[in-house]
């Protein structure tokens, strides 16, 4: 979803929106950072799932290296 569309949703719901930051990708070339989400007026920013997934990926890579899986 483009940043302008995200802004429309936030405005339309009076800021009562929970969003997750996102990295840039081929589909969405512009990252949506926590600072961007705060500036747009979202009520909540969730980072838990992203941090959890990053930790799991790091632990999996380390375990694969240690146990030669």
Image (spheres, rainbow, N blue to C red):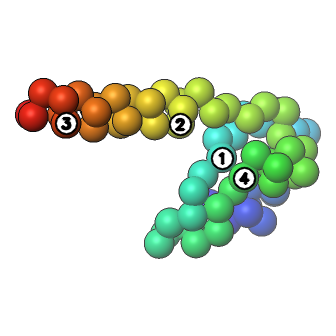
What x and y, as percent, mark residue 3? Answer: 73, 63
Distance of mark 4 from mark 1, alpha carbons?
5 Å
Can see residue 8? yes
- Mark yes or no: residue 12 visible: no
Q: Nearer the viewer, mark 4 or mark 3?
A: 3
Q: Closest to the observer: 40 or 61?
A: 61
3 vs 2, front mark? 3
Q: Nearer the viewer, residue 11 or 44?
A: 44
Quick check: marks 1 and 2 in contact, CB under 8 Å?
Answer: yes
Image position of 33 (left or right of 66) = right
**29 relative to 69, above or below:** below
**Element assignment for label 3:** helix
Residue 19 percent location from the top left of the image: 69, 40
Q: Are marks 2 and 4 in contact (CB under 8 Å)?
A: no
Q: Earlier in the sequence, mark 1 or mark 3?
A: 1
Residue indicated by mark 4 = 33
Q: Earlier in the sequence, mark 4 or mark 1?
A: 1
Tell me the number on the disc at residue 3.
none
Closer-to-camera residue (4/55):
55
Q: Is residue 9 left or right of residue 20?
A: right
Question: For this view, does 30 lie left or right of residue 9?
Answer: left
Q: Is residue 28 above or below residue 52?
A: below
Q: Are marks 4 and 1 in contact (CB under 8 Å)?
A: yes
Mark 2–mark 4 Cα distance, whole angstroms, equals 13 Å
- Tell me the CA gap for discs 3 and 2: 23 Å
Residue under circle 3?
A: 65
Which one is earlier in the sequence, the residue at label 1 or at label 2? Answer: 1
Mark 4 or mark 3, which has the lower sequence index? Answer: 4
């Amino acid at each position: 979803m483009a940043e302008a569309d995200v802004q429309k949703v936030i405005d339309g719901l009076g800021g009562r929106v929970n969003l997750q930051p996102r990295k840039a990708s081929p589909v969405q070339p512009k990252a949506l950072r926590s600072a961007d989400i705060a500036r747009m007026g979202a009520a909540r920013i969730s980072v838990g799932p992203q941090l959890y997934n990053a930790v799991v990926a790091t632990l999996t890579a380390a375990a694969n290296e240690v146990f030669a899986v």
